Image: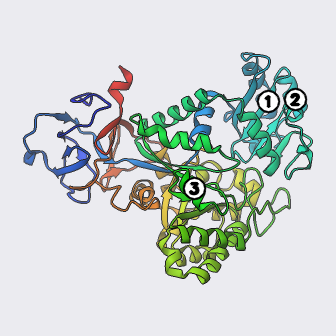
Amino acid sequence: MSLAQPARKTERMPATLYRGGRIYSPADPRATAMLVEDDRIAWLGPDDECPDVSDVVALDGALVTPAFVDAHVHATDTGVSLLCLDLSAATSAADLLDRLAVYAATLPADAVVLGHGFDESGWPSRRPPSAAELERAGGGRKVYLAQASVHSATCSESLLAFVGGGLESLLGYGDDGWLRAAAHHAVRDVAYASITEPQRRDAQRSTLRRAAGLGIAAMHECGGPGTSSEQDFTALLALPKSEPLPEVYGYWGELGAAAKARELGAVGAGGDLYADGALGSQTACLTEPYADTGERGNAYLDAEQVAEHIVDCAHRGMQGGFHAIGDAAIGAVVRGFSIAADKVGLERVRAGRHRVEHAEILDRDLIRGFVEFGLVASVQPAFDRLWGGEDKMYALRLGVARSLASNPLGSLASVGVALAFGSDSPVTPLDPWGSVRAAARHHNSSQRMTVRAGFAAHTRGGWRAVRRDDEGVLAPGGPATFAVWRGVGDLDRGLPALRPDSPLPTCARTVLRGAVIHDEEATTT
């Protein structure tokens, strides 16, 4: 495939014809060619009707589709996780300690050891190592290891002592070094303070470049107190303005801070505005107890606080939203929207196109609330792929019945709830085609979506979630934002069939509004 011409990677292409491929476009199902002029699509059609232009890209049978949007990302954390100790393959507490000891030995004695991704739910002990064990394996270094959910972490004795300051009195503190809720946030802030500003920029740049290489042209960054600093957040939003990278739409999750979110450059006051925690860390707030602990998790907001925030957003013309995973937390959010609708009017609430991030445990009544208030469900199909079903982490936490009922993508889609797919990276990897396949192969067959519907949720759905309704399709006059794919295998209604064991497509080029932000040939040469 000849994709390295005609223009330099960082330049716009005034008039470029892509031909000899397959174009996924409802505007013209016959299309095998597409003309791009500046930042728009000027023409679509079959090869034998192509306009005469000098700059031609030979697709060699490749598939062209709208580029993906990842609707929930933590860019700095993702980049840091790519560079720090990866614990996703650890099979036991002992294995984690072995990996830690090898990695820590490569670092200076005063370094803070950062690690990410362990999932203790499948280990024999089902608990991470203690603070004392981490202290020994880390050679006396300060050690911070985030659980896969990123809502808890296990830490060494020296790091706990360094934080000090009444840490033991905070919600979620554990003498064994396994921290949740406020205690986790306090230690996380200290651990991540060891990352320099240049390292943070490099981490963000690494994330965005990786996204572009996966056919992702836009990302929704979910920040807020306890997740990222204001400086980190604003620096990320500025980065794509100076380099050929995916666009970043920011959400700042701070209660009652719609005005502040706008000042920071955010498109919404939501994202990581926590109504509860996460299932992996047993902090998602449930109406029925966890099967493995008998507890119900943590509620961080009540319905009145939710309502107050949405009313503030409505008065300031801002989109609002909340992180809510458990049914008790989602119930508080839905009740809050009902109170807000009584105060500012239902249509005004619906017009805000407010969001709920994750929305994993919910029943028909809660789904009815999403429909009534016009809420966008920003969801992660990979959660079911990795942890759903009858014998994985959700079954341990919730029991099999609730595990199979979790992440009800099909139920949400069937009643018209607007869906936007994302990864929650680094909780799960940036993997758009994998997410589409996960939605189509949900552990619960009644919750499966078609590949076509899943693809729409990961493309146009992401644009609609940021209220850009003209984006996410390939049509004459529309934005020239697309990806070119190799290795697509069999097609079903114009898209890869994504069979369970087939390789996923690979991205040869990603174009954002006419500008090439990823070129496979340029990257490998």
Q: Amino acid at mark 2?
A: Ser
From mark 3 to mark 1, how far is it between C-alphas?
A: 33 Å
Image side of residue 16 versus residue 275, left or right: left
Q: Which residue is mark 3?
A: 261
Res 358 visible: no
The answer to whether the residues at label 3 and label 2 have Cβ atoms under 8 Å apart is no
- Residue at point 67%, 33% (across, down): 89
Q: Nearer the viewer, mark 3 or mark 2?
A: 3
| Location of residue 297 in the rendering, given as x and y in whole percent from the top left corner | 79, 60
Secondary structure of residue under mark 2: helix
Q: Which residue is mark 2?
A: 158
The answer to whether the residues at label 2 and label 1 have Cβ atoms under 8 Å apart is yes
In this rendering, is residue 493 above or below 485?
below
Image quarter of residue 339: bottom right
* Labels 2 and 1: the sequence-earlier one: 1
Image side of residue 83 versus residue 498, left or right: right
* Labels 3 and 2: the sequence-earlier one: 2
**Which of 153 and 490 lies nearest the eye of the viewer?**
153
Q: Which residue is mark 1?
A: 143
In which quadrant of the rendered image does the C terminus lie? top left
Q: Nearer the viewer, mark 3 or mark 1?
A: 3
Secondary structure of residue under mark 3: helix
| Location of residue 232 in the rendering, given as x and y in whole percent from the top left corner | 60, 40
Image side of residue 440 versus residue 294, left or right: left
